[in-house]
Every structure is written in structure tokens, then in C-alpha cells.
Image (spheres, rainbow, N blue to C red):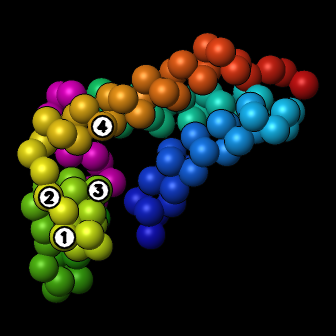
Amino acid sequence: MLHGLVVLFVVGGQAIVLAGWWRGWVWTRNAVFRWSHLGAIAFIVAQTWLGQLCPLTIWEQQLRVRAGAEGYSGSFVVHWLHEMLFWSAPHWVFVGVYSLFGALVGLCFLYYPPRRH
């Protein structure tokens, strides 16, 4: 559940930033929200480029095994995309997608910067 909330924050947060930019919502320029969002996607992109699994994925797998459930290999996103959509792709595809999404977040940060209120 925690992992899903992080994914929702990163993806949903970007959708909110774009909608706020388009609609002129001042609160979407909140510095704490924007810096947290940028930090989250920067961490995700960096760990993906380094070929590392997300710490939440590792923790989730360990908790599943401790609870007697079967763990899974690979990342949280790859696992659940496969489970929900029956879609699988090589690691480099996810590196590219995460990198492009990170670039979108970075560009929005530059062209629609956070403001202190």
C-alpha cells in the first residue's frame, strides 16, 4: 500500500502540477510539495539508472516472504504492470520511461517553478 501511495504521489503529483499550471492554481507551486515531488522522481531515476531495486520493493518482498507469501522478482512497477496489464518489457524500457518522466518533472520545475507564499 505504501508503495502504491508513492507511485500515486509521483504520477498523480505530476498530473496535478500540469493541471495547476494550465488552470492557474497557486497551491500547485507550493515549495514543499514541489521539492518533495522532484526529490522523489530524482531518486527513482537515479536508482533505476544504477540498476538498483527500489528500497520499498526490497522491503515489500521481504515482508511477503516473512508472511509466508511468495515474493516476486524485479521491481514493484514491473511486477504490478505485469499483473494488471500482462505487459512486460526489458529493464531499459523502464529506464527510458522513468528518465522521460523525470525530465518532464524537471522541465515543469524550471518553467513552472515553486513559489514561497
Is 109 on the left-hand or right-hand side of 78?
right
Which corner quadrant holds the C terminus? top right
For residue 107, which quarter of the picture? top right
In the image, which residues are magenta? 47-59
Task: Establish if 100 lies above or below 64.
Answer: above
How far apart in space, not on screen, are marks 3 and 1 (Cα)?
12 Å
Circle on res. 88: 2
Circle on res. 77: 3
- Residue shown at the point (59%, 34%) measured from the top left: 36
What amino acid does circle 1 point to? Phe
- Looking at marks 3 and 2 on the same chain, the residue that comes earlier in the sequence is marked by 3
Q: Residue under circle 1?
A: 86
- CB atoms at circles 1 and 4 under 8 Å apart? no
Q: Residues within 10 Å of mark 1 (few under 14, many from 20)?
A: few
For residue 102, which quarter of the picture? top left
At mark 1, the secondary structure is loop
At mark 4, the secondary structure is helix
At mark 3, the secondary structure is helix
Q: Is residue 56 magenta?
A: yes
Q: Say whether residue 63 is visible.
A: no
Q: Is residue 48 magenta?
A: yes
What amino acid does circle 2 point to? Ser
Task: Establish if 68 lies above or below 71.
Answer: below
Q: Residues within 10 Å of mark 2 (few under 14, many from 20)?
A: some
Is 18 on the left-hand or right-hand side of 82?
right
Q: Residues within 10 Å of mark 4 (few under 14, many from 20)?
A: few
- CB atoms at circles 1 and 2 under 8 Å apart? yes
Q: Residue under circle 4?
A: 97
How far apart in space, not on screen, are marks 3 and 4 (Cα)?
12 Å
